[in-house]
Amino acid sequence: MAFFDAGDAAIYYEITGEGEPLMLLHGYALNSLMWEMQIPALAEKYQVITVDLRGFGQSSCGKSWSGNAMADDISGLVKHLDLKSCTMLGFSLSGAIAFRIAYFHPDRIARLIMVSASLPSSGAPRKRAESLAQKRELDILMARGVDGWADKAGFRSGPLVGNIFKRNPEAEPIWERILKRHNPEFLRQMMEARANSSPSENWRDKLAEITQPTLIVAGGQDKRFIDASHYFQRKIPNAQLQTISGAGHMLNLEKPEEFNRVVLEFLESYE
């Protein structure tokens, strides 16, 4: 376990195993503990690097929080560790971050994996409803702390979380550890910085410039993000889509063995 100095933030990361590097990035409101069911299987053949993105888990935030800021953090870590021929995996929110890193560092990022990935920014201004929702989330955190935020914002109950535990009860204690790792001050910094950020560039137009072999993994029941996965497949030139049936958004926790197999088969096909 170690920290990378990103200037205005300290970025927490861990390295497990040896071999070709494979970096795993997490989604919003999560942290690197979400990969507990992947690390043992992947680290048998690869050097697995897990990261807490700025503002989440053990990573501080500073005054800036955006896709570009997080991509700069991870790009800096890639250079700091002198990673070459690295596979970059992004989940949900961080799919757009992984894409940016692959775009800027084709010499270092050999392959790209997008899991339940959200679309990168179109450059359109943030909608008022989204800004209000973000303000409400910050108000909840300030009034109720991390536990209250997790409960009120739906990170402990509701269709998303409930389906994880129905499909794989072993994921529930991992989920609790994910939530307990968050630092309330770092989350506050993240939410305040997010409120002051604004989209400025259409990243979707750059998807066609990705040159790396790309694996897109989607849950067959992930209604909110499945269209984005098909969009990536159409726009990224050398992309393949694998759909895991019976899984939703958190497919790595819902169906870990099948997810691990899909990722390993993709990596091993380029050995």
Image: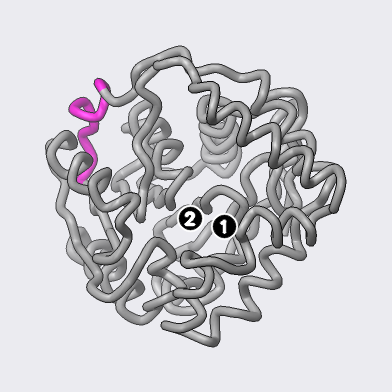
Position of 49 with respect to 84 (left or right) is right
How many marks are shown on the rendered structure?
A: 2
> How many residues crowd mark 1 within 10 Å: few (<14), some (14–19), many (20+)?
many
Q: Position of residue 3 (x, y in %)?
A: 74, 47
- Residue 30 sits in which quadrant? bottom right
Q: Where is residue 90 in the image (x, y as percent from the top left)?
A: 42, 49
> How many residues crowd mark 2 within 10 Å: few (<14), some (14–19), many (20+)?
many
What secondary structure is marked by label 1?
A: strand
- Residue 14 sits in which quadrant? bottom right
Identify the magenta region.
205-213
Q: Which amino acid does label 1 sit on?
A: Thr
Q: Which residue is drawn at 67% across and 40% down?
A: 54
Q: Which amino acid does label 2 sit on?
A: Leu
Position of 38 with respect to 185 (left or right) is left
Of all residues shown, which one is farthest toward the bottom?
A: 169
Q: Where is residue 15 in the image (x, y as percent from the top left)?
A: 59, 61
Q: Name the residue carrying label 1.
A: 50
- Residue 218 sits in which quadrant? bottom left
Q: Which of marks 2 and 1 is nearer the N terminus?
A: 2
In the picture, the quarter occupied by the C terminus is bottom left
Q: Name the residue carrying label 2.
A: 24
Figure colour scheme:
one colour
Q: Vertically, is 185 above or below 206? A: below
